[in-house]
Image (tube, helix red, strand yellow):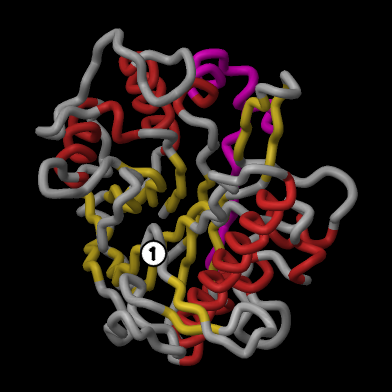
Amino acid sequence: MRIATYNVEWFNSLFDDDGALLMDGGWSGRHNVTREQQTLALGAVFTALKADAVMIIEAPDENRKRHAVPALQAFAKAFDLRTSEAIVGFHNDTQQEIALLYDPYVMTVRHDPRGEVSGKKGAHNSPRFDSTFRIDLDVDAKEDLVQFSKPPLELEVQTAKGGALRLIGAHLKSKAPHGARNDAEAMTLSVSNRRKQLAQAIWLRQRIEEHLDAGENLILLGDLNDGPGLDQYEDLFGRSSVEIIMGETGKNCLFDPHARQGLRRRLGPVPTSARFYLKGKKRYLQALLDYIMISPGLVEKAQGWHIWNPFEDPKLYKVPALREALLTASDHFPVTLDIDV
């Protein structure tokens, strides 16, 4: 089967409150891209992926007035996708949900969150992802209370071939230093936000170790907004979120070849999965942010990872329609894993 992760920039803006697609000339959430242009581009990309399941990062909003599942299923129906069913977990307040779009003939899926509900006081040992985590983030001997702005999506999956999987969809994010009045305040806020992101990574790593200690097959996928050498704060904290989540030594390390390549090559080229325009510098920045990490027991079953970046894949670049669709659909490119389970 093929499993994908795809961060779709402002997918939410392509639907009305009833979950119907807005196929018109109004502006999408993407710069200088209409809703019709982005929707058609996404339809082309999802069709080309031929995936059995897609973990969608920044999926349509889930709240009292809007619902992600019917919106995603309307999108799948519009483009006759096999991935016709959708599931979400704990909703958040960012208009950017985490959801899985999947083929019901290939797998059955159930939202299955783990961990205790900790309440406002929090807990130390991997509480449920919509709860509060207690951790000392620095050296002040005072514990901090950490929450996910986008709680990871935990799924129990049974494949048609009889395989059992745990899927965790994640979207970690270190907020920009909004409200800073000068460079000193900006640095203070940036360091604080970075610490919180690393705390979320430690929380997520605790859950990973629970699954691996239990001998379960696990796939963690999504946008970690972090990677080796990505920013100047890595040296301050010693490790990136990616390194924490993957594990560095021992039997419980997750594997992703792109992440491992990035860790080995702090200088020199690494694969990239996202492309952002820097207005001030009038150029594009490419970065590796999107990952599909698998547990040790799945490594021999894996048949290959692929980042659908047309600037790094000559076959994609030589297909103009798909190349343009990938560039129009989002500021991230999909990542796929072919695996026999």
- Residue at 46% across / 63% down in the picture? 340
Q: Is residue 56 left or right of residue 259?
A: left
Q: Classify the position of the N terminus by image quarter.
A: bottom left
Asked if residue 261 can be seen in this view, the reply is: no
Residue tagged by mark 1? 152
- Residue at 45% across / 26% down in the picture? 329
Up/down of 240 relative to 309, above or below: below
Up/down of 295 relative to 142, above or below: above
Name the element at disc 1: loop
Q: Where is residue 160 in the image (x, y as percent from the top left)?
A: 27, 64
Q: Position of residue 77 (x, y in %)?
A: 18, 32
Dividing the picture into quadrants, the one containing residue 44 is top left
- Residue at 26% across / 62% down in the picture? 90
Judging depth in this view, the residue of 13 and 257 nearest the camera is: 13
Residue 216 sits inside the magenta stretch:
no
Q: Classify the position of the C terminus by image quarter.
A: bottom left
Up/down of 235 relative to 244, above or below: above
Dividing the picture into quadrants, the one containing residue 279 is top right
Q: Position of residue 339 (x, y in %)?
A: 49, 59
Judging depth in this view, the residue of 153 and 301 nearest the camera is: 153
In the picture as drawn, the residue positioned furthest to the right comes out as 267
Q: In this view, does 86 lie to the left or right of 321?
A: left
Please state the extent of the stretch shown in magenta in the rendering.
301-325
Q: Position of residue 55 (x, y in %)?
A: 39, 51
Judging depth in this view, the residue of 20 and 139 nearest the camera is: 139
Asked if residue 37 can be seen in this view, the reply is: yes
Q: In this view, does 97 lie to the left or right of 9?
A: left
Q: In this view, does 170 lie to the left or right of 178?
A: left
Say what amino acid the circle numbered 1 marks: Pro
